Structure formats: C-alpha cells, structure tokens
Amino acid sequence: MSVLRLGAGQRWTVDGPAWSDLSAVGWFSLERAGFRFDRHHHSCPEYWAVVEGRARVAVGAQEYDVAPGDLVCTPAGVEHDILRAYTDELRLFFFVAAVPEGEPAGHLHRQPEFALGHDVGRPGPPAG
C-alpha cells in the first residue's frame, strides 16, 4: 500500500503500510464547539503541519505563533500544547515517529490533570 486516503478527522495507527516507521498519522482540528486540548508528550517525535488557521503553541518552554505552512516539530519526551487559537477553526495534519520498543504509545501526561485537557483561549489575532 502506497496511498492512504485520510479524510478530515481520520487517522491510522495500525492500518498503515507494514514497512512504515510511523506509529500514527492523521488530521485533527479544533472548531468553535470544541476548543479543548491537553498538554502531553510522547515516547517518540511528533510533527504537526498547520493546514488551516492560526494559533499559539508550546513546545517545551518555548511558545510559537503558527499559521498554514508551518511544521511544529516536537522531540521525544518534550511536552507540547495548543495554548490559543486565533481563528474559528484550526486544522492540522500530524505524524508520529515509531515508538521505541517497550515504551508507551499515545498521549502521555506528566500530571494527571493534564489528561483532562484545558480550554484553548481564543483572543483576537496576534499583532502584526
């Protein structure tokens, strides 16, 4: 299999090509009705490609304003989060590298309350 057709909101975690070293690929979006997200980390690197919208994200202690065409690159073990959305819709394509053998997969949380997620603030667009 060389082409995966992923519609909005779809992802794969086990149905991808057997030869791929990615552990997950898909789309996610935050829309007016559900602007919530969780501060988390992974046992492997994760990448978000911003497709639509603008936001402020955190990768470790750094914060960045992102827009379409930006690629957010998060190393293994580094917490990341969506702090604020500047637009009514934020749509991202993500891919997650291979999970090292014996390590946990998925969203990992350093504090239990992080798993509950938080409201993503929605102020006006950033200056400039």
Image: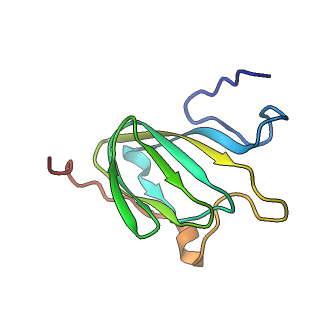
- Left or right: residue 24 compared with residue 55: right
Q: Which residue lies furthest to the bottom in this view?
A: 111
In front of the other: 87 or 70: 70
Residue at 79% from the left image edge and 35% from the top image edge: 15
Residue at 41% from the left image edge and 70% from the top image edge: 61
- Left or right: residue 86 compared with residue 9: left
In front of the other: 83 or 50: 50
Where does residue 3 sit, x and y in percent of width and height?
71, 21
Placement of 89 over or under 62, stated as above or below: above
Placement of 22 over or under 105, stated as above or below: above
Where does residue 16 sit, x and y in percent of width and height?
77, 34
| Quadrant of residue 58 within the rendered picture | bottom left
Where does residue 53 sit, x and y in percent of width and height?
34, 39
Where does residue 49 sit, x and y in percent of width and height?
48, 40
Placement of 55 over or under 75, stated as above or below: above
Residue at 65% from the left image edge and 48% from the top image edge: 96
